[in-house]
Image (cartoon, rainbow, N blue to C red):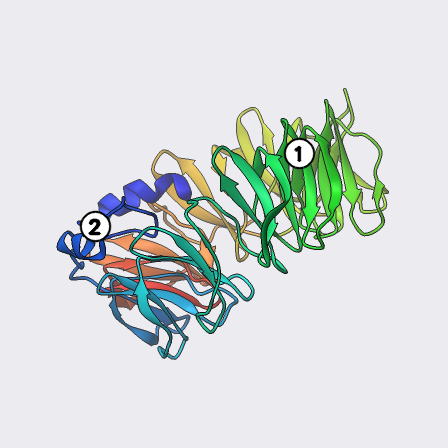
Amino acid sequence: MKQYYILYSICIAIIYIGCKSDSATGPLSEKEYFNDYESDRQKWGLIDKLGNVVIENIYDDIHDVTNEEWIAANKRGKWGYITIKNRVQIPFQFKAAKPFKGDYAWVQNFENSWTAIDKNGIPIISTQSQEFTNISKGYYGIKINEDWQIRTSKDTIPVVDGLDRVNPFINGTAIVRQNGFMGLFSDQGEWVLEPRYDRIKRTFNVDHILVWQGKNVLIYNIKTDKTSRDYAEIIAVDQDRYAVKQEGLKWILIDAQEQTISELPYSTVFSGGQSYILTLEDNKFGAIDKNGQVISEPEYPLIQKFQDGFAVIMRSKDNYNYLSTQGTLLLPFDLPIAFDFASGFARVALPEGISLLNAQGSLQRNVIYKDLKDFKNGYARFQN
């Protein structure tokens, strides 16, 4: 739960002093940079879901494990890339390093310029700009002076310029803003949607996006180039379910063919994650499934989105628990702080440090961490 991260940090007394982040810290030479650099005595490593240490905590910092082969890690102030077996793939030499996305990653040298490298560490693009997107099939967005451009890795001449903003490429397309309107640009070098929409939002279905024109919102199918009828509001539920509302009417649940599944007798609904819907009545939250079946009547002051089969709920101030997709509470007691489940575990702050809560409601007290991050792709960053 993002809103509790500050409290969480206080509880476990984590203090970062002098450590350098991924972002630029000013035009310092490498010598000046390291004159001011202090490695934290507490190092970072990786564990798997069984609690086995797969990478010893020897790094000043380490990124989450993504679907890519290489993991960015910081050793004595310099970033490089390692494998999950802790083999150095690209030597530690950079001031900052972003995760690989596809075949490329952006790295920063100690003169503060950024370079896109391939998985052999070979430079592809170099720039002094501090703002850019990932590279997708050679296309990327970059901010030059006050404007954004779309370029290719083979040419510095913009494919499109004069843009307000270029967002990262996801599933082959980037949401782009120009002259206050939004469009969709593909990594095939062409507009999927010209910038004429007030707002664009992705859904769980990679072929479907939501587009706003004035007060109306539609479901646009990229693959078929077709749009749904106009709605006053649309909430994406999962790959083929949407909660929609027409002006002056209650919410209804429809499928991708706009056939009604059920009516929803609630004034307000939200996407609840994992194909669930959160409901709100009289300032109380409840939950229903993608077919409109009630999981929990509106009774809680707060429900977070479902993750790994559970949603954090607040029963009263500083009292949290976990609601299962069957509508039952996981714990017989409440927690003062609760974090979302990820890969079968939720982090729990104890007086002696951080432990893990499993899906059966048991604490794994055999290992206590000074700090522990969420599991990503089966691995979690830890610090002892």
Image quarter where the C terminus lies is bottom left
Count of all numbered marks drawn on residues in the image: 2
For this view, does 13 lie left or right of residue 186? Answer: left
Query: Which one is in front, 342 or 106?
Result: 106
Residue 63 shown left or right of residue 228 in the figure: left
Q: Residue furthest top?
A: 248
Q: Which residue occupies 33% across, 57% down?
A: 109
Q: Which corner quadrant of the image does residue 229 belong to?
A: top right
Q: Residues within 10 Å of mark 2 (few under 14, many from 20)?
A: few
- Element carrying mark 2: loop
Tell me which numbered mark, 1 or 2, is placed earlier along the sequence.
2
Q: Residue at x 77, y 22 (%)?
A: 247
- The residue wearing badge 1 is 182
State whether residue 8 is above or below residue 100: above
Residue occupied by mark 2 = 16
Q: What mark, if any, has residue 300 been given in the picture? A: none
Q: Secondary structure at mark 1?
A: strand
- Residue 83: x and y in percent read 41, 75
Residue 145 seen by the camera: yes
